[in-house]
Amino acid sequence: MPASLARTADAKLDAARSLWQRNEVAGAEAILREAHRSEPAREDTATLLAEVLRSQGQFSAASQVLCDLCRANAFEPSLCVRAARFAQQCDRHGIARAICDAAIAGGTVTPDLRVVAGHLAREQGDFAAARTHYLAALDNGIDLERNHVLGALANTRRYVDAADPEIARFAARFADARCSLRSRASAGFALAKAQNDLGDYAAAATTLHGANAMAHAAKPWDAAAWERFTAARQGASVAPAGAVPARDFVPVFVVGLPRTGTTLAATLLVRTIAAHDRGELRALRFIADQLIAGGHLASPAALAEAANLYRTLAVQDDEKTTWYIDQDPLNFRYLDVAAAMFPQARVIHLRRDPRDTALSLWSQDFAHPDMAFSSEFTDIAAFMRGHDGLMRHWKRTLQVPVRDLDYEALVSDPEATLAQLRDFIGAPAHEPQADGNPIGVDAPVQSASVWQARQPVYSTSVGRWRHYAPFVLELARFGPGA
């Protein structure tokens, strides 16, 4: 490209970025679309256009822009990894997988590309394809310090043979002192999962003690900061947004301690009503953190603007409906903000035997810093106390209805439980069609519960703590009377 044209293109990009920063979105989008048409292979232009579109809830359009960018660049692998991850964050797994498939078909396949393709397939419940990609990544030397592929691989099937070579692979990495603690911990969680599948609970407990000690050393948690946070949340005063409750938009917040069944409840519910399951949307926590940091909780105008943003990010640019399910369990921290923005909202609060919850948390390899408490039972207990205190406070003070849902009831009688949930949120039952629910039944699952959410409902996880009680004495502190 001639230097003068390059300068012109750079100037347009700068102008669009300036408009977007001033919230003049339409002007920014117009400039970027014209620039993208002129130079479809230019990554910085396409990336900014995709960000602008995503900020307006146009997740499909944003993901398609990056798919077109990859096509214009002959599906270059590193670009495809970045584009597929963006589409994955938008829950547009169909577009993301199309990007990966085209890159793989092109013949130049990197281990990183295989890992992303594996994650996408697993989150859509295509475990066979996920295994193919993960094993290819491992065979081609994926960096296990940066990519915790072993844990992902372990969660694509159940293990039935102690001599399975994958189990030996997990054990070797877990024992390798040359590796980082975090990488070894990830392999340990994979090994423990396989040992649990085999019913060797003593070995699984030993492995989990070691893996969690490594994870805790690599990523400690601040219990005092959590206590200060929950106290501040209970003392906060939030002004209502002042808007008339919208009948055409009903957010349903499925909350609770992680590993209490929030993903399962949302996944099952969306199969019976015409709703969109937006997964762990992460929008409420972002909005609430911004309002708190800026001191805007008492501003009706700020709450109204925040409500518009949340609605935009929830509704997106696919088929419209009335009910939108947000299954981020940690939204329990900000239910006062949710209620102020949406007086028509409904809250479903999952509860589960604390011993099963604690064991499930302790058995899972979590990547997000918010979950750092899960590697140590004292921290798990402290987090539970904060959760319980906040939920008691919300139930006393919030104007939106909160329905408690026991995990044990959900898995023992899902049909009756789901009927009660439908009545609670005011959604009519969806009549299944030949092709299934046309709204949100095939939504990808990006939480740690992806395997469970894709299986038929089973109750074997109820009372699972009993298998571990002789080997994990810390569970006794979560029992009755503890």
Image (cartoon, rainbow, N blue to C red):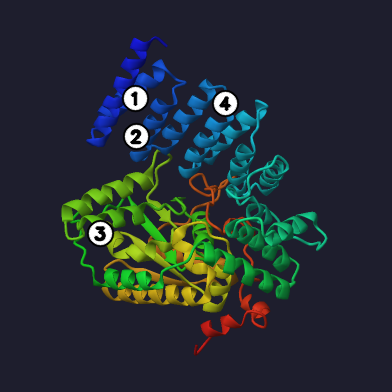
In the picture of the structure, the residue carrying the numbered disc 3 is 292
437 or 100, which is in the foreground?
Answer: 100
The residue at the point 40 percent across, 21 percent down is 36
The residue at the point 81 percent across, 61 percent down is 161
Relative to 356, is 304 above or below?
A: above
Amino acid type, residue under disc 1 in the picture = Leu
In the picture of the structure, the residue carrying the numbered disc 2 is 52
C-alpha gap between disc 4 and disc 2: 23 Å
Q: Tell me whether circle 3 and circle 4 mark residues in contact (CB < 8 Å).
A: no
**Could you say whether the residue bearing mark 4 is in a helix, strand or loop?**
loop
Q: Residues within 10 Å of mark 2 (few under 14, many from 20)?
A: many
Amino acid type, residue under disc 4 in the picture = Phe
Tell me, for residue 172, which label it has, or none. Answer: none
In the picture of the structure, the residue carrying the numbered disc 1 is 32
In the picture of the structure, the residue carrying the numbered disc 4 is 75
Amino acid type, residue under disc 3 in the picture = Ile
The residue at the point 44 percent across, 75 percent down is 384
